[in-house]
Image (tube, grey):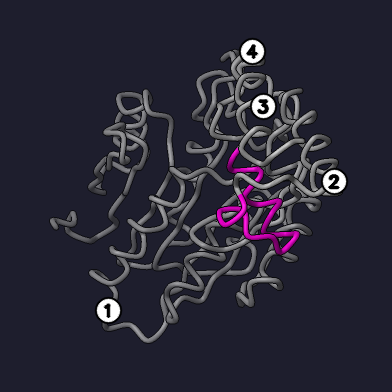
Amino acid sequence: MTTFAKAVREYEKLCEQHDVPQETVLAYLVELSQLERYNLYMHYDDEMPKDMEELFDAGMKRILNQEPMGHVLGYSWFYGYKMIVNEDVLIPRVETEELCAQVLMRMDHYFKDLDVIHTADIGTGSGAIAITVAKEEDKVDMIATDISVDALKTAKENALNNEAKISFMAGDMVKPLIEQGVKLDVLISNPPYIPQEEEMETSVVDFEPHVALFGGNDGLFFYRSIFEDCSKVLKDKAFMAFEMGWDQRERMSALVEEYLPNDTYEFVQDINGKDRMLFVYHNLEKWEK
């Protein structure tokens, strides 16, 4: 007899052998049991139904083969919103939720008197950032851009499923906004920022789109692109928010000072104390909590 508890213990051992985080086992089983409308915690020591056992075994086989849990399920949770994920988009990370929270706080601080906050998410991927910010702040008028038509298809589906009103534009970084004469209060981007030659986990390299991961030789290619063009889309008073690599602070500082010498900026640490967010203020005083 295979109980839920026994299955979890056995797969946790296998995860350790296959270099997969052990907490993935229970996380996957929780999602699977909810999909099957089964109260896992009330029956944790009970025998696992045969059909669920088959589903669980099949999914865990893929996960042990380094396939991301989000791809096995077909979705991932982000800021409480359910996002479809697939081979065309990057699976949204927990760290990016922190970027959304920081953006929302600054919107409240700088633009509380505006009726509409014109905002864009550049390189939207799954649409997670655009959807979250648009849903959490009623005053936001959100545009989301991406060069990948396939990614935009997924983002549009996620926006529809989450009832988020977003305008989508296909094109390279800021260029679609320039072409349409868009002016922004807030520009947000989580661009590809991993250096081309950096070694990464198999689950990322083999299953997630490289166009959403790698940012040129030094990881800063897409930041340069935005910094070069941002003056054409920012309003007189605006701010920009970026996710970045934890070890890129020095290089990002040099980049901002080179391209945007008249703007102020700050780095914000994530919950683990790492520099993971950059905020650039255009004709706004740097925010002090």
Q: Quadrant of residue 115?
A: bottom left
**Going by the image, does 8 lie left or right of 206?**
left
Q: Is residue 260 visible?
A: yes
Q: CA distance from mark 4 to mark 1?
A: 52 Å
**Going by the image, does 261 lie left or right of 23?**
left
**In terms of sequence position, does the residue under pointer 2 or pointer 1 come before the other?**
2
**In terms of sequence position, does the residue under pointer 2 or pointer 3 come before the other?**
3
User: In the image, which is nearer the foreground, mark 1 or mark 3?
Assistant: 3
**In terms of sequence position, does the residue under pointer 2 or pointer 4 come before the other?**
4
Q: Are marks 4 and 1 in contact (CB under 8 Å)?
A: no
Q: Secondary structure at mark 2?
A: helix
Location of mark 2 (residue): 50
As for residue 193 lying within the magenta part, the answer is no
Three-letter amino acid code at the position of disc 2: Lys
Image quadrant holding the N terminus, namely top right
Disc number placed over residue 43 in the picture, else none: none
